[in-house]
Amino acid sequence: MQKNPSKKYRPFPPVALPDRQWPDRVLTRAPIWCSVDLRDGNQALAVPMNVSQKLELFQTLVKIGFREVITAEKIGKLSIVGVGMKSHTGVAGKLFETLAKEGVNISMISTSEIKISVVIDLAKAEQAVKAVHAAFIGN
């Protein structure tokens, strides 16, 4: 492992979008927060982490500058999946708009070419699933 893993990559070049703030910001130090699931967040990994690997990840996060770890209980994960997402625009917008109309707050977003997952309050999970199903599939 590198002595300072935060120096492994060059900063991504800014994206010039004058009407937005985030694309042209460059990270120069560890972010204030980062969503990392150290419990069972291995679903996306080809080879799941064992306990010692999770501990190493946690120690690395601390080493590169994270100073606080917050845990959350009673959360749910809602995912929409499909290879067609790659070629269809507006899927994420439709998901986020649907959840907003239902008053469902998104705590975390994870994406890939074929999937969008959101972490939400478990108390609103059933409501969210029904609304998203209706928005994408119909009643």
Image: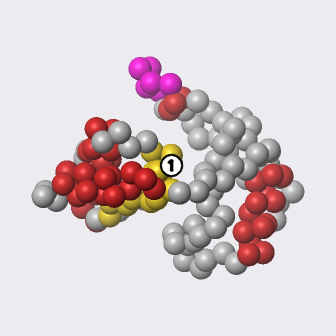
Q: Name the side, left or right, on which 115 lies relative to 73.
A: left
Of 3 and 118, which appears nearest the observer? 118
Q: Is residue 52 magenta?
A: no
Q: Main secondary structure of the magenta part?
A: loop
Quadrant position of the N terminus in the picture: bottom right
Q: Where is residue 29? Give x, y as percent.
A: 74, 37
Quadrant position of the C terminus in the picture: bottom left
Q: Is residue 133 visible?
A: yes
Q: Name the side, left or right, on which 89 lies relative to 38.
A: left
Residue ranking furthest to the left: 139
How would you rate the neighbour count of disc 1 (Cα within 10 Å): few for under 14, some for 14-19, many for 20 or more? Answer: few
Residue at image coords 58%, 30%: 25
Place residue 85 in its image quadrant. bottom left
Of 31 and 121, which appears nearest the observer? 121
Of 30 and 121, which appears nearest the observer? 121
Q: Residue under circle 1?
A: 108
Q: Is residue 93 visible?
A: no
Secondary structure, mark 1, is strand
Q: Where is residue 132? Give x, y as percent.
A: 26, 53
Q: Amino acid at mark 1?
A: Met
Residue at image coords 54%, 77%: 46
Decide: is 98 above or below 119.
above
Query: How many numbered marks appear?
Result: 1
Residue at image coords 64%, 47%: 34
Q: Which residues are magenta?
A: 16-21
